[in-house]
Amino acid sequence: MTTFFEFGLRKETTKALTDMGFEEATPIQDQAIPIALSGADMIGQAQTGTGKTAAFGVALAEKLEEENNKVQGIVLTPTRELAIQVAEELNKICQHTKIKTLPIYGGQDIGRQIKALKRGPQIIVATPGRLMDHMRRRNIRLDNIKMVVLDEADEMLNMGFIEDIEFILNEIPTQRQTLLFSATMPKAIKELSNKFLVNPKHVAIKPKKMTAPNIEQQYIEVPEKQKFDVLCRLLDIHLPELAIVFGRTKRRVDELSEGLNKRGYSAEGIHGDLTQGKRDSVMRRFKNGSIEVLVATDVAARGLDITGVTHVYNFDIPQDAESYVHRIGRTGRAGKTGLAITFATSREMGHLKTVEKVSKGRISRRPIPSFAEAIEGQKKMTVEKLLATVESNDYNNYKGLAEQLLEEVDSVTLLAASLKLLTKEPNNVPVKLTGEPPVGTKGGYKGKSGRGGKGGNFRRSRSKKGNNRDRGGKKPGGFKKH
Ligand SMILES: Nc1ncnc2c1ncn2[C@@H]1O[C@H](COP(=O)(O)OP(=O)(O)OP(=O)(O)O)[C@@H](O)[C@H]1O
Ligand SMILES: [Mg+2]
């Protein structure tokens, strides 16, 4: 394994990486950093959670001029949350230099962004739609751009951003360096790279399977109507630190988060119809642990790096293998382990097998957990909490009361009653979700063909019919959301 010192980086960059706790380069960093530093165009592919951000971040930190207050680097991301996160990571990597990174994305006050742009950031991390707004208003000059990074390039194509990306790239001087990153690289990427990259070097850390090795993958065959109860049981059994539950549509996400709250879980939803303020506050509270379950559409499937996500639940099976790989990749990052569980109805079993085959991982079958197992899980949690309180030594105010009670009731009875009180027994508050058609069968959504990978027409035509899936930056009528 290579340490960052071996790349011959300037000391400001190596110091920042050390401050960030990075000791050795990950395999993608090991291979991509020297190529990016050499000035070559590059296509970089490596599994989720393996440090692609820092791979291009280090190159940006090294190659841009800190004394020059013109925008010299642009990173495009498919979602707003990812733009914010990537900008944060780049600011960390550049913390000992004068290089500043600004995220610009839809839904945020444009006046504020204009002011921030005037302060002269060297790097901009943007969603395509909002960057184009600024370009049209001439708030941003792109003639000093030296390096362009397309993060999650394939997703930007899936979302129908192809014309926007072409428009943006056509406005940037051609002597720039262009880098393209993702964990998945479907064929459509080839056309884009043929058009906009010059003799790109391919760096692919491609193990046998697309999914990261430290994610345990399971599925449960469960009828649509039982999914919600099964999810609650699993949450009680697994006791995740933080969990992400993926639902297919915005309505689904709303109904699921409402239902989970009714059953006593602290859950919030995130999807593209919420205001940016709400999206930001949900993400903030999830990151700081005040929400335990994030319910999300695919808007949260790509790139998000949230420490503490131990479990991912595909409440609705993803549309295709790529979506599966990215969704489950929100756990098991940076060497940590994670558990991903996918629900499939009997009619979706064929689709599940296809996802398993294409992603080349093994998804093992698990039975529907019982109510008794759920109670056992909760009891375990109570005992853990109780023992932690014993350890903390912070109960002396209660000792007198305990002695009084022990004069009346025997110790086992008292403790058993206390344990019952402390245990959140699974409740059965009725929760009704609107049914979703199965994926991969007639009447449902079709795997790949439904993604509109090339032209993006899918997105627009579906939205006209009132589909409320969450892939797509363009509202009917051609407005852009991102
Ligand atoms: N060399 C390193 N040593 C230790 N941790 C690292 C290193 N490089 C990156 N990380 C950490 O690993 C985590 C995942 O990195 P990152 O988000 O860049 O992954 P990614 O490859 O872009 O994944 P995805 O495909 O999901 O976008 C981050 O928390 C990051 O800070
Ligand atoms: Mg990433």
Image (cartoon, rainbow, N blue to C red):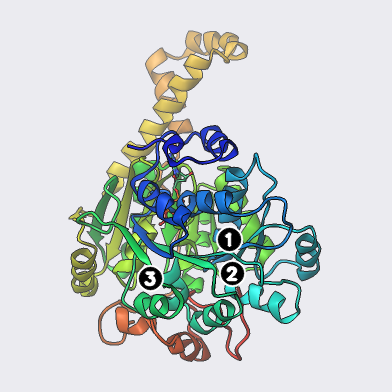
Residue at mark 3: 199
Pointer 1 residue = 83
Residue 101 falls left or right of residue 253: right
Q: Marks 1 and 2, Cα distance to the nearest angstrom?
A: 7 Å
Contact (CB < 8 A) between labels 1 and 2? yes
> How many numbered marks, from 0 up?
3
Seen from the viewer's position, the closer of residues 196 and 126 is: 196
Q: Nearer the viewer, mark 3 or mark 1?
A: 3
128, above or below 359, in the image:
below
Of pointers 3 and 1, the one earlier in the residue sequence: 1
The kind of residue tagged 1 is Ala
Badge number at residue 220? none
* Inter-mark Cα distance, 3 to 1: 27 Å
| Secondary element type, mark 1 | helix
Q: Quadrant of residue 119?
A: bottom right
Q: Is 110 or 378 nearer to us in this picture?
A: 110
Q: Position of residue 327 (x, y in %)?
A: 39, 60
Q: How packed is label 1: few (under 14 Cα within 10 Å), some, or many (20 or more)?
A: many
Identify the residue position indicated by label 2 in the image: 127
Q: If you read the primary sequence from the N terminus, does the residue marked by circle 3 or circle 2 appear first?
A: 2
Indicate which quadrant contains ligand 2.
bottom left
Crowding at dot 3, Cα within 10 Å, few <14 / some 14-19 / many 20+, comes out as few
Could you say whether the residue bearing mark 2 is in a helix, strand or loop?
loop
Type of amino acid under label 3: Asn
In the image, what residue occupies the spot 49% across and 74% down?
470
Helix, strand or loop at disc 3? loop
Q: Is residue 382 above or below residue 210?
A: above
Q: Position of residue 20 (x, y in %)?
A: 53, 36
> Disc 3, disc 1: CB below 8 Å?
no
Q: Amino acid at mark 2?
A: Thr
Mark 1 Cβ inside 8 Å of ligand 2: no
**x, y percentage for residue 425?**
41, 42
